[in-house]
Amino acid sequence: QPEDKPLQIRMARHYYDVYMLSHSNVVDQAIKSVALLKAVAIHKSVFFRSKQASYETAKVGSLKLLPEQLLLEQIESDYKAMEEMFFDELIPFAKIINALKLLENKLNKINCE
């Protein structure tokens, strides 16, 4: 996302959702699926196209889950503003980001079948 473009409200929810999915019982199977990666890239390019994204190069080894630090700070503020939307205790934002960094590394090192 360009730095001059304002962050959409509740964008932080996507990071929370990926964090929760990363703790599901299907994550290891899902991240090994090249077909799933291709399907997600195609779906995103059709329904949620972004000029900044390069869907054609979405391949293991170059996947990026987290934005630059400046945008991360905006996402953290957005996350804190969403606190009332969560039923359970709010997961610390740093914990979410650390988990997504680990997931990003895992995704980029996976040997796809």
Image (cartoon, grey):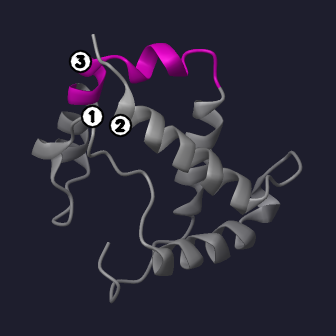
| Label ID, residue 60 | 1
Q: Earlier in the sequence, mark 3 or mark 2?
A: 3
Considering the numbered disc 3 on the image, is that residue within a helix, a strand or a loop?
helix
- For the C terminus, the quadrant is top left
Residue at 31% in and 45% down: 63
Magenta includes 32? yes
Residue at image mark 2: 108
Of residues 22 and 112, the one drawn nearer to the viewer in this rendering: 112
Q: Secondary structure at mark 1?
A: loop
Looking at the rendered structure, the secondary structure element under dot 2 is helix
What secondary structure do most residues of the magenta stretch adopt?
Answer: helix
Task: Kindly indicate the quadrant of the structure image that contains residue 22.
Answer: top right
Please report contact status of discs 3 and 2: CB closer than 8 Å, yes or no. no
Tally the marks. 3
Q: CA distance from mark 1 to mark 3?
A: 12 Å
The residue that label 3 is drawn on is: 35
The quarter of the picture where the N terminus appears is bottom left
Image location (x, y in percent) of residue 20 = 65, 37
The image shows residue 49 at horizontal and vertical percentages of 19, 54
